[in-house]
Amino acid sequence: MKKLISTLILSASLFLVPNTDEAAARKWKPAPLQSAQDYLNINHKINDQDEVFLMWVAPEYLEKQPATKPIRDVLSRYVLVGIVHFTIDGQGVFKFRDVNDLTVELPGNQVFSPMNEDELPPILPTVITFLSKALAGGMGKMGQAMKFYVYDTGNIDTCSSGTVWVRYLKERYEYKTPLPNC
């Protein structure tokens, strides 16, 4: 379990910091894992001050190793989404909005609300706790403010053709499958 947690923290700390610099260079010949992590993170600059950072922690977000198999298995059954909505005032002070009313949609008008914490399989609260700690270390205040939601969507084959949408406010963020790193 220690190796599993260490692997998860390392993966999260290396790849979860959003790129808010729109002039950043693209990655040259990214590894499949890096491509998946880049794809699963969405940074939406709503206006000059308002931003949303969203991540779907799909199985492809983690390296394919025996140590990550239990987490990858549970992530193939549930959709785990992290989100932080923030504004930056003229003096560079972050203010975080309370995020609620986040839903996941699948084709066929299937809409899912987040699960209650007491309904989660035992491994997911542990995963969320460690992701939260890694994000707080890698992203500072943004990572500390990130909230995670879990959706019981049944098995989603992230390596087959399909779509998963995350709806927040007026946006419908889209993830096309198959995901990189399948």
Image (cartoon, rainbow, N blue to C red):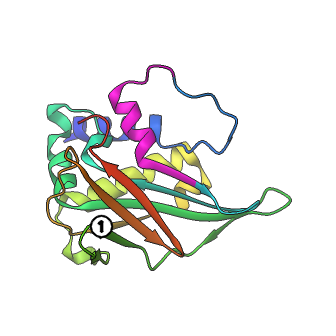
Question: Would residue 120 be seen by someone viewing this image from the given angle?
Answer: yes
Quarter-of-image position of residue 116: bottom left
Q: Nearer the viewer, residue 66 or 52?
A: 52
> Dividing the image into 4 quarters, which one contains the C terminus?
top left
- Where in the figure is residue 109, as x and y percent of width and height? 27, 76
- Where in the figure is residue 130, as x and y percent of width and height? 36, 51
- Residue shown at 52%/26% (left/top)? 27
- Residue shown at 30%/42% (left/top)? 179
- Where in the figure is residue 40, as x and y percent of width and height? 40, 47
- The correct choice, above or below, for 51 with respect to 131 in the image is below
Does the stretch in magenta take in 34? yes
Does the stretch in magenta take in 106? no
Question: Would residue 57 be seen by someone viewing this image from the given angle?
Answer: no
- The correct choice, above or below, for 169 with respect to 57 in the image is below
Q: Which residues are magenta?
A: 28-43
Please indicate whether residue 140 sits to the left or right of residue 76 in the image.
Answer: right
**In this view, which residue lies farthest toward the right?**
90
Which residue in the structure is indicated by mark 1? 150
- Where in the figure is residue 24, as x and y percent of width and height? 65, 33
* Callout 1: SS: strand
